[in-house]
Image: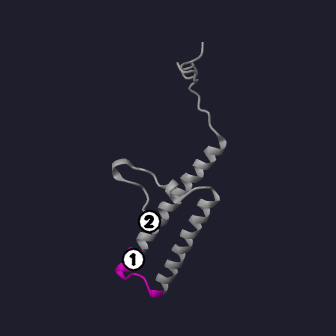
């Protein structure tokens, strides 16, 4: 007798997960890029906060701005490469709103 996990459901499904390798790979890329985008946005906010406090020199501000701009461009490239948009990376947190700014 099959165990409960493999017994067919009334609609004929077995209860087993049927995973599409392409979808799993795309979802993993999406998750990784979401984490990278979240970190990029946090670094950007921290940099702006430090600039507002006057903790950085003009040269450091220039380097931070260039680095953040390049990171943003690279995120766009990675999204295009994997067939994603920035909206695909944003998680809906229900009453809290969305994870990422845009």
Residue at 57 percent across and 65 percent down: it is 76
Magenta run includes residue 82:
no
| Vertical placement of residue 83 versus 23, above or below | below
Q: Between residue 44 and residue 76, name the one nearer to us.
A: 76
7 sits left or right of 50 in the view: right
Q: Between residue 97 and residue 34, name the one nearer to us.
A: 97
Magenta run includes residue 55:
yes
Callout 2 crowding tier (Cα within 10 Å): few <14, some 14–19, many ≥20:
few
**Chain part drawn in magenta:** 48-58
Callout 1 crowding tier (Cα within 10 Å): few <14, some 14–19, many ≥20:
few
Residue 55 image point, x, y percent: 39, 81
Total tally of numbered discs in the picture: 2
Q: What residue does disc 1 label? A: 50
Q: Between residue 31 and residue 20, name the one nearer to us.
A: 20
Assign the magenta stretch its main secondary structure: helix
Residue 29 image point, x, y percent: 59, 53
Furthest residue toward bottom: 58
Q: What residue does disc 2 label? A: 42
Residue 70 image point, x, y percent: 56, 73
Residue at 35 percent across and 79 percent down: it is 53
**Quadrant location of the N terminus in the rendered image:** top right
Query: Looking at the image, is mark 2 or mark 1 earlier in the sequence?
Result: 2
Residue at 37 percent across and 47 percent down: it is 94
Name the secondary structure under disc 2: helix
Name the secondary structure under disc 1: helix
């Amino acid at each position: 007798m099959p165990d409960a996990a493999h017994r067919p459901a009334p609609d004929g499904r077995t209860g087993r997960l049927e995973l599409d390798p392409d979808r799993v790979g795309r979802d993993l890329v999406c998750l990784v890029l979401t984490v990278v985008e979240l970190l990029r946005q946090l670094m950007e906010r921290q940099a702006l906060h430090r600039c507002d406090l006057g903790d950085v020199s003009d040269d450091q501000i220039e380097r931070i701005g260039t680095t953040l701009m390049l990171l943003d461009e690279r995120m766009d490239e990675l999204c295009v490469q994997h067939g994603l948009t920035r909206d695909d990376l944003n998680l809906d947190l229900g009453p809290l709103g969305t994870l990422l700014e845009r």
